[in-house]
Amino acid sequence: MTHANRPVPPGLLAAYDDVLAAHWPAGTSSSLVPTPYGATHVNSCGPVGAPPLVLLPGGGATSTVWSAQASLLGRTHRIHAVDLVGEPGRSVRGERPIRTVADLNAWLDALLGGLGVESAALCGHSYGGWIALRYSLYAPRRVGRLVLVDPTGCFAGLRPGYLLRALPMLLRPTVRRSRAFLDWETGGVSPDPARARLRDEAVGFPSARPVTGPRPSPGQLRGLRTRTLVLLAGDSRAHDAGRVAARATRLLPDAETVTLPGATHHSLPQTDPGASEVGLRMEEFLSARARP
């Protein structure tokens, strides 16, 4: 039986619900939005009719990682936190797989349409940041503002040492290997017990092969007119934060870059140091008036 055909770990959904109950705002609602690629699960909170903010997690994570930002920004925005199709969470893959960047863009088009959202602020962490940037290049009129939280594959490659450390976990994922890798990357910063349990349960999720591709070209990045905030983990072992910041500043016409001291790639966006600052920086960025 292939990895993609293995059943969902029985404890994952219970752990997922425990994190929602413990950390998400009261009144958070859940929905399944039909798309050509399957039913996409979304956790929503904040005033109905408020400006929409769509949140995409990194690979191997769920929408629940955005609890700190949802609690803060849900006062002024309608939050829609998404479980990526084919990744851990409550989304359900359809018969049509997501195999290309065009598929990802079509999936997000369908998702926004299903949510009744014509245009939204879009935020992604890690791989979710790559998806968000790609979609912003494809459909700039549907992205009012863009937030990239320690994005990978957007402005610089991953460090070879990071890839070597991740390789055993990627080839044969186990809870022990996952914990060892994340302890190394975060310097031993651990989430609370509910989040740690969900992280462990997600290791056995039958994830689909993620869509990958080259970084956007300099020409594509220079053509992006969407106002963008790039939040970088100062102690990220995934890539060189200084190099990412320099390239984003040089290539994006309307971008602000902020490096969060002490934060690491895998502690964001849910664990301090860094999680609270992510929310505050996003609040300031999203509330600022558009430049003339």
Image (cartoon, rainbow, N blue to C red):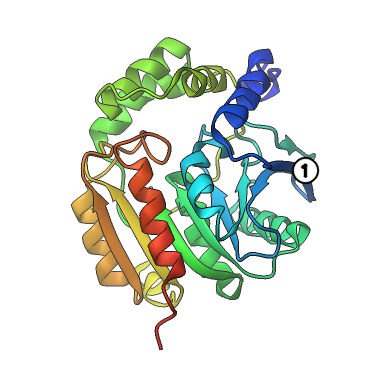
Element at badge 1? strand
Residue 186's spot in the image, x, y percent? 29, 28
Give the camera-side residue of 191 and 62.
191
Residue extending farthest to the bottom is: 292
Residue at (28, 32) in percent of width and height = 162
Residue at (32, 32) in percent of width and height = 163
Q: In which quarter of the image is residue 190?
A: top left
Give the camera-side residue of 243 and 288.
288
Q: Quadrant of residue 266?
A: top left
Residue at (63, 70) in percent of width and height = 119
How packed mark 1 is, by other alpha carbons closer than 10 Å (few <14, some 14-19, many 20 or more), is: some
- Kind of residue at badge 1: Leu
Give the camera-side residue of 39 and 49.
49
Viewer can see residue 196? yes
**Quarter of the figure with the N terminus:** top right
**Quarter of the figure with the C terminus:** bottom left
Residue 60's spot in the image, x, y percent? 51, 32
Q: In this view, does 217 lie above or below 253?
A: above
Residue 80's spot in the image, x, y percent? 63, 51
Q: Classify residue 190 as left or right of residue 84.
A: left
Q: How many labels does the image show?
A: 1
Return the residue at label 1.
32
Give the camera-side residue of 93 and 182.
182
Viewer can see residue 206? no
Q: In which quarter of the image is residue 126?
A: top left
Q: Classify residue 139 as left or right of residue 29.
A: left
Q: Is residue 181 above or below residue 39?
A: above
